[in-house]
Amino acid sequence: MKGFTGAWVLLKKDFFSFYRSWVGVLVLFAFLLVAGIFFTLFVLGYSSLSMEAARQGYEGVGRMNLTGFVIGAFLLNLGVLFLFLAPLMSMRSLAEEKRTGTLELLYTYPVSDFEIVMGKYGALLAQLAALFLPTLAYLGALRLLGGQIDFGIVFSGTLGFFLLGAAYLAMGLFFSAVTENQMLAGGLSFSLLMVFWVLEWLAGLAPRPWGNGLSAFSPFVHYRDFALGIVDLQAVVFFLSAAAFFLFLALRTVETRNWKG
């Protein structure tokens, strides 16, 4: 644990400083507001569909899984929402440190480059947890509505969201490491995420060999199974590999700048 002391100190500092900033407050407010709207709309949609099915006598629709319909759709849309919020969360991680000169100050402390990167990344993951965990209260709302909770879908969907978020934030941390301008870092991160989003559409339009290749690199294709209650080992490896790849790039960037200094 001694080797991770510096990372832990940076994690705590970044976590609390983020939510003391206007960006942190904006991200938290936007996430919880839009998440609440999504949840309400999907509950109302399920209720409307169930009543219509009861009137028409559609037994198959009447046996529809409440958790799968509401929570599955809810998590899928949260994944799209986080595409817009991840760049805001990660853009200032290292860019702001370089702009203010505090990153150079960190180099004078007994903190390794690895600890700097992992401390920053750990803070981003903690911020992600702080955003998502309040939404689990919606499970209580579903119970009050008389629904049976399918915890398999809840577990797989939660796991998928954190894996997706971990990959997005690692990418954002890398772009924050390559520039001193946090707005540029956020813009680069968002642009690449949009490319990955478009890959899913292109995969559906392209001929089979090319479509399969494109879908293999689409985070949303891999994420969809989690929201449906399926934990695919290939998807887990995809997200962990993507996070590890961008963390490696961020670490090498920090090491290079440190060496140049």
Image: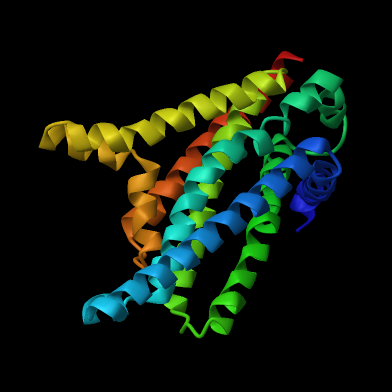
Residue 145 appears in view: yes
Q: Is residue 68 left or right of residue 7?
A: left
Quadrant occupied by the N terminus: bottom right
Q: Is residue 68 left or right of residue 170?
A: left
Quadrant occupied by the C terminus: top right
Which residue is drawn at the image coordinates 48% and 66% (left, top)?
44
Compared with 131, 183 (above or below) is: above
Please state the horizontal and vertical placement of residue 101, each as a whole percent of the image.
Answer: 85, 21
Please state the horizontal and vertical placement of residue 184, each as a whole percent of the image.
Answer: 64, 18
Who is closer to the viewer here, 121 or 219? 219
Please state the horizontal and vertical placement of residue 147, each as a whole percent of the image.
Answer: 47, 82
Who is closer to the viewer here, 55 or 224? 55
Q: Is residue 71 left or right of residue 206?
A: right
Which residue is drawn at the image coordinates 35% and 40% (left, top)?
218
User: Which of the 4 quarters of the picture holds residue 99?
Assistant: top right
Residue 247 appears in view: no
Compared with 45, 60 (above or below) is: below
